[in-house]
Image (spheres, rainbow, N blue to C red):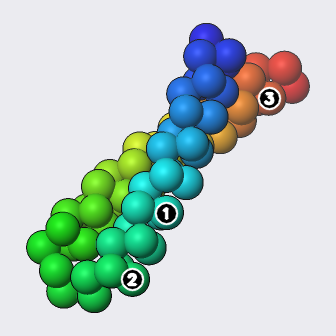
Amino acid sequence: MLLVKKVQMKILEIKIARGRARLQALWNAKGCTDAEVLEAGDELDLLLNKYQRLLDEKKRTRRFVEQRHI
């Protein structure tokens, strides 16, 4: 199960990097108020939220495992 989470996190890291690059390119080309720029920002926010949820879940799992071994 932990391997699956690691793979999911790695995939999200790649998507986040691509999303950031896309957002920066759009920002440079169209400015900060263009609808496409705002949409790209929203998409990046969703990816970052997913990543944070996985990270939080990983931390909770680690704490649970550590408590069980005490």
Residue type pointed to by label 3 = Glu
For residue 66, which numbered disc appears in the image? 3
Residue found at x 68% / y 16%:
3
3 or 42: nearer the viewer: 42
Please indicate whether residue 66 sits to the left or right of residue 63 in the image: right
User: Pointer 1: what residue?
Assistant: 21
Q: Nearer the viewer, residue 27 or 67?
A: 27
Q: Position of residue 21 (x, y in %)?
A: 49, 63
Query: Callout 2 environment at 10 Å: few (<14), some (14 to 19), or many (20+)?
Result: few
Task: Report x, y in % for residue 38.
Answer: 21, 72
Sooner in the amino-acid sequence: mark 1 or mark 3: 1
Describe the element under mark 3 as helix, strand or loop. Answer: helix
> Mark 1, residues whose alpha carbon is within 10 Å: few (<14), some, or many (≥20)?
few
Disc 3 versus disc 2: nearer the observer: 2
- State which tag comes first along the sequence, 2 or 1: 1
Work out whether residue 42 can be spotted.
Answer: yes
Query: Label 1 sits on what residue type?
Result: Ala
- Which of the two residues, 62 or 34, is positioned nearer the viewer here? 34
Residue 41: x and y in percent read: 30, 67
Callout 1: SS: helix
Kindly identify which numbered label has been placed on residue 28.
2
